[in-house]
Image: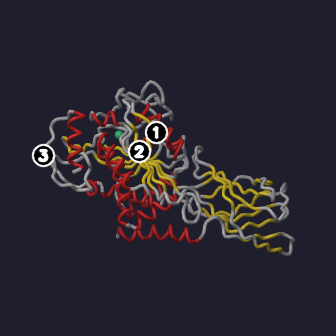
Amino acid sequence: MRVAVGLVLCLLLTGLTPIASASSESDEEAWPGEPIDNHVHMTWAALTMEVKEWADDNPDIVTLIDAGKSELGKSLWVVQISDWSMETKANGKAKEIVYIDGGHHGNEYLGTALAWLSAQWYIEGWNEGNQEAVDALQNTEIHVLIMLNPDGNDIDTRWNINQVDLNRNYDHYWNTCPTTQPGSAAFSESETAANSQYMNDYVSDADLYVTMHTGVWIMLYPWGKWASQPSDWELFYDIREDVHANISDIPIQNANQGLYPNCGTSRDYGYGVMGFPTFTFETDDEQFVPGSIEALNERLGEEMDVMRYLITNVWYWRARLDVQSIQVSDDKVTIDVDNLGHASTTNASLQYVDSSGQVAWTSSLFSVNASNSTIASLDASNFSYSKDGTWQLYYQKRVIDASKWVTEPLEINATLVEDDDDSSFLIGYGLFSPTTILAGLAVISLMRKEEE
Ligand SMILES: [Zn+2]
């Protein structure tokens, strides 16, 4: 039935004529629009009905946000999906945040479809009691802006209504490379301005941003602007290795080399300004064969496997420092620290907070490589240890300058051991409960098993 409604709206709103026989399947999995030519097309009106229905039917997990208007005044809907009965994870820690958008280019329907499907998979999974979906929504907020360019979408064009390429309109080295139609200034268009506003207002702590397009079957990480690898190359290489070993052969490359030099893109903005790990996910350009009734979730099944991997493991897409021990002596503090995350950090410091809550001492900076350990010896000649204070770590989640800083108290049950030299030895269990870590590892190994 939904399919039929989509069909009627298509005709009324876009005047696109050659619509063949509507498929009679009222398949819940199908794209709620109609194949037009060799594309699969969903109008903004059909999307609006769909996302409102999601929110009405699933108030426990779906919140619908109007993130701003297109140049023609159409709402840019963001579907926020999480277990909203819990503000945090069960262990009291903040949930991880994932941001997804689709439809920058109005004629790249399959990319828009992948964004739609990413939202739908978790909503349906939750309702069916799928453990992976339930775990994800209890530990993660997934924000999906499915159709960023509804004006262009409804008239089947790459550009927005002002003939601007929205994915060249972001405020990151805007118009500094050969490009067409980047707009009159960075964020000159209401769609890109709204998207960056949403990133800042709702998902500034995101540990994953995927922007979905259609063209060459490839995943692109920063930079588009430069051929050089990004500061967090280890994280991107690690993800590539994992995806290729266990999920898909999709090429994963630096955007500049994998595609062509480009600038002012949402991907480079997301990484270079917001500090997110970002991917452009390009589905291939075959779209649908005319007359095909292949279900969308089968057509994009492999792409969804990659998305599910990225979302399930989002906890790892940053540095995660876990202190094993801290040793205090007269003139130095020695810290033994693991990095459980898959991104490095180069700007970490250890801080001592006195009983009044003031930071009484900050160490010099130290680095901990991704998935690695470090024993750092820190100068403490200006540090007077008082035994009644607490410790915390202050560091950047990733290497890129724009990356967020975090302050994490050490949950150390301080066991003070005096040794012969009058120095003290503190032993603690670090930041994260062993249960969380084990749960995370279990998920990864489960996913690997499935693929074999
Ligand atoms: Zn595109």
Q: Position of residue 71 (x, y in %)?
A: 39, 29
Q: Are marks 1 and 2 in contact (CB under 8 Å)?
A: yes
- In the image, residue 165 sits, relative to residue 217, either above or below, namely above
Residue for point 32% across, 37% down: 106
Which residue occupies the extreme top position in the image? 184
Task: Quickly name the residue at label 3.
Answer: 21
First in sequence: mark 1 vs mark 2: 2
Q: Position of residue 155 (x, y in %)?
A: 27, 33
Q: Is residue 210 visible?
A: no
Which residue occupies the extreme left position in the image? 21
First in sequence: mark 2 vs mark 3: 3
- 282 or 7, which lies in front? 7
Task: Quickly name the residue at label 2.
Answer: 145
Quarter of the rendering containing residue 349: bottom right
In the image, is 253 to the left or to the right of 49? right
Q: What is the image's colouring?
A: secondary structure
Location of the C terminus (image quadrant): bottom left
C-alpha span from label 1 to label 2: 8 Å
First in sequence: mark 3 vs mark 1: 3
Q: Are marks 3 and 1 in contact (CB under 8 Å)?
A: no
Mark number, residue 195: 1
Residue for point 47% across, 44% down: 222
Quarter of the rendering containing residue 134: bottom left
Instruction: Identify residue type, mark 2.
Output: Leu
- In the image, residue 186 sits, relative to residue 298, either above or below, namely above
The residue at label 3 has a CB less than 8 Å from ligand 1 = no
In the image, is 17 to the left or to the right of 199? left
In the image, is 149 to the left or to the right of 386? left
Instruction: Identify residue type, mark 1.
Output: Asn
C-alpha span from label 3 to label 1: 37 Å
Q: Residues within 10 Å of mark 3 (few under 14, many from 20)?
A: few
